[in-house]
Amino acid sequence: MQARTPEVRDWLAGLQRRITDACAAVDGKPFRADAWRKDPGEPLQGSGTTMILEEGDVFERAGCGFSHVTGPKLPPSATQHRPELVGASFEAMGVSLVFHPRNPYVPTVHMNVRMLAALPPDAEPVYWFGGGMDLTPYYGFEEDAVHFHRTCRDSLAAFGDDKYPRFKAWCDDYFFLKHRNEPRGVGGIFFDDHFEGGFDTSFAMLRSVGDAFLAAYLPILQRRKDTAFGERERQWQLLRRGRYVEFNLVWDRGTHFGLQSGGRTESILMSMPPHASWAYQHAPEPGSPEAGLLRDFVVRRDWL
């Protein structure tokens, strides 16, 4: 039994092209396309394209991947909340990106939109959609956080007044470093296992979120990318990137799904920054901009 996937695949591939074309135009350096296909005989089958830009003028590393895979059995990370689907085969596809800017005054951004179809034997496919976007600044600017959240809210407005508050809270809960009792950044929106109003409505909401990414991030990127910075700002950026690495490796379900299901490791880990650092019990100077980030931005707030 085949899932209803071609239209989703076409839109996802187009989204990847639109985002990488727009961001390459800002940087001045093109993304490199790395097309891949799983070897015959592997449990996980499929293909995709990883678009990567490294050592650009604006982006130190920007990765945007599209993947479409099938597997004989859903991994544990996908069935922990859906025990009735344990043992089902699956088809999964999505676009995931993480952009690590060179300038510490430009925030790191993450966005993901995906569809998963569980294919139980002798039963109809079970679909769910997921995704969202979130912002991780190194220096806090109120107007940037407000703009990002307004764009997220507007992308969901047509699908019910409950969506932005629900998905904003979900994002705050999800992108949280439990071992440090600390949010990853200023949040955004996050949703998973979503299927409300049928396939067409759920897919339309996914498209609206994905299509809003450039409007959410490019104005912030343009506003901050030429800000002067020095070694102090660079070292703070590297320390905060260390927190990003901790979340992705310890808590992120997408990373776990990819590694548990036999996904392509190089593409899964493209979200890692090219440089990061850790310092024992580091604390910023009181009253400094770095302390202001932790006090005013790396907290749960109603940005609207």
Image: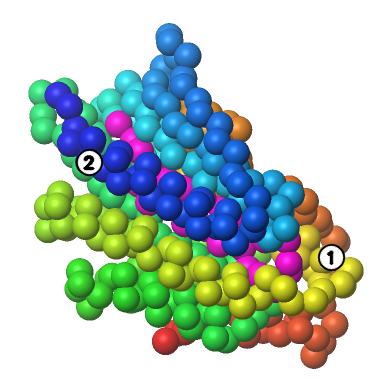
Looking at the image, which is closer to me, 159 or 106? 106
Residue at 69% of width from left, 46% of height from top? 54
| Callout 1–callout 2 Cβ contact below 8 Å | no
Looking at the rendered structure, the secondary structure element under dot 2 is helix
Any part of residue 168 in sight = no
Q: Give left or right: position of 224 versus 213.
A: right
Looking at the image, which is closer to me, 46 or 75? 46
Above or below — where is 262 with respect to 57?
A: above
Any part of residue 1 in sight = yes
Residue at 72% of width from left, 73% of height from top? 226
| Magenta stretch, residue numbers | 91-114
Q: Residues within 10 Å of mark 1 (few under 14, many from 20)?
A: some
Residue at 71% of width from left, 53% of height from top? 56
Disc nearest the viewer among 1 and 2: 2
Q: Which corner quadrant holds the C terminus? A: bottom left
Most extreme residue toward the right, as rendered?
A: 231
Which badge, 1 or 2, comes first in the chain's sequence?
2
Q: Give left or right: position of 152 versus 290.
A: left
Residue ID for mark 2: 7
Residue at 69% of width from left, 60% of height from top? 58
Q: Position of residue 175 (x, y in %)?
A: 52, 62
Q: Give left or right: position of 176 versus 206.
A: right
Q: Residues within 10 Å of mark 2 (few under 14, many from 20)?
A: few
Is residue 111 in the magenta section? yes
Q: CA distance from mark 1 to mark 2?
A: 44 Å
Residue ID for mark 1: 235
Most extreme residue toward the bottom, as rendered?
A: 287
Q: Give left or right: position of 158 versus 63.
A: left
Above or below — where is 61 with respect to 304?
A: above
Q: Amino acid at mark 1?
A: Gln
Q: Main secondary structure of the magenta part?
A: strand
